[in-house]
Image (spheres, rainbow, N blue to C red):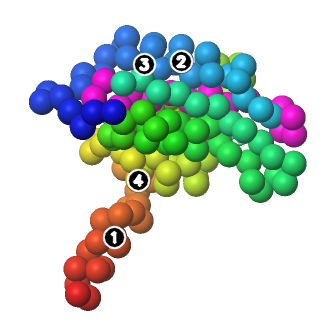
Amino acid sequence: MSDARPAEPVEITDETWASLREAAIAALPHAYVPYSKFPVGVAALVDDGRLIWGCNVENASYGLTLCAECALVSTLHMTGGGKLVAFTCVDGDGNALMPCGRCRQLLFEHSAEGMLLQTVSGVKTIDEVIPDAFGPRTLAAYREAHD
Ligand code: THU
């Protein structure tokens, strides 16, 4: 594990999106989806250049289902931390899928400023998909005002 971060921001090109899509599709066969039969694969680029991915893992107690983004965020922390700079989510046919509301919140928490997402309506920033988000800065600002 390393704390090293690049001096330069990671560049996001068409090749980046192609690699993310490929990794998200490669994650699909690992999905555990006996209930919904709806596999989801995700992949992201981290600010140090790492590429990480994940799939959804369901549960007989449906509400305990782990979206693919949960696996991704766990892997982010397990493999050195950092912030997400680019993200892709696909369904079982490899089509772009919008992350659910809870997962947008999850991604926001770990996003680099200006993080990009490949969506059903093109590339968008994290702020566009979860505007005026509640997050760590909300809590910090409140704490600061009340200390
Ligand atoms: N799912 C994800 O993994 N991520 C999302 O952003 C949307 C929904 C999963 C949860 C469940 O296993 C299946 O898709 C059907 O809802």
How would you rate the neighbour count of disc 1 (Cα within 10 Å): few for under 14, some for 14-19, many for 20 or more? Answer: few
Q: Distance between the residues labelled 2 and 1?
A: 33 Å
Q: In this view, does 22 lie to the left or right of 29?
A: left
Say whether residue 126 is magenta.
Answer: no
Which residue corresponds to mark 1? 138
Say whether residue 43 is magenta.
Answer: yes
Label 3: element kind: helix
How would you rate the neighbour count of disc 4 (Cα within 10 Å): few for under 14, some for 14-19, many for 20 or more? Answer: some
Q: Contact (CB < 8 A) between labels 3 and 4?
A: no
> Residue at the spot x=52%, y=42% of the render?
74
Instruction: Check disc 4 and give the amino acid type.
Output: Glu
Which residue corresponds to mark 3? 17
- Residue 7 picture location, percent across and down: 12, 30
Which residue corresponds to mark 4? 109
Q: Identify the image quadrant of residue 48.
A: top left
How would you rate the neighbour count of disc 3 (Cα within 10 Å): few for under 14, some for 14-19, many for 20 or more? Answer: many
Which residue corresponds to mark 2? 23
- Residue 126 picture location, percent across and down: 39, 45
Q: How far apart are marks 1 and 4 (CA)?
A: 11 Å
Instruction: Check disc 3 and give the amino acid type.
Output: Trp
Q: Identify the image quadrant of residue 39.
A: top right
- Residue 76 picture location, percent across and down: 44, 37
Q: Is residue 114 left or right of residue 96?
A: left
Instruction: Check disc 1 and give the amino acid type.
Output: Thr
Give the magenta range. 34-49
Q: Is the magenta stretch mostly helix, strand or loop?
A: loop
Q: Of the numbered discs in the image, which one, if any, rests on residue 80?
A: none
Q: In which quarter of the image is the N terminus?
A: top left
